[in-house]
Amino acid sequence: MGEGGRKRKPFHAFRASYVWLCREQGVDPQWVQFQLGHRDPGFTLNVYDRWSDAAMQAEAIRAATCPI
């Protein structure tokens, strides 16, 4: 328990927040993988990567308007 009786977040919650913020801003997954010290970017994305609804909508719009 932290100050004021609040439950503390585990250390890895900070790593998850870092990955989430990087991915929301379009940072390359390999860069994020390197920063976390993982050998495989797939591991990084499978464990830590979560998209918000707003980010998924923005990516869908970007993909739909991107010329092939």
Image (cartoon, rainbow, N blue to C red):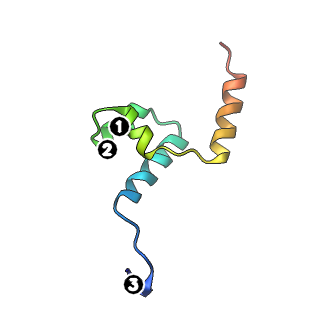
Residue type (three-letter) at the residue carrying disc 2? Leu
Name the residue carrying label 3.
Answer: 3
Q: Upstream in the sequence, badge 3 or badge 1?
A: 3
Q: Secondary structure at mark 1?
A: helix
According to the image, label 2 marks what residue? 36
The N terminus, quarter of image:
bottom left
| Amino acid identity at mark 1 | Gln
Furthest residue to the top?
68
**Residue 3 point in image, percent of width and height:** 39, 84
Q: Badge 3, how many Cα within 10 Å: few under 14, some, many 20+?
A: few
Name the residue at 67% across, 21% down: 66
Q: Which residue is mark 1?
A: 33
Q: What's the residue type where badge 3 is placed?
A: Glu
In the image, residue 21 sits, relative to residue 13, either above or below, namely above
Q: Circles 1 and 2: CB distance less than 8 Å?
A: yes
Task: State the residue at coordinates (43%, 76%).
Answer: 7
Q: Residue furthest bottom?
A: 4
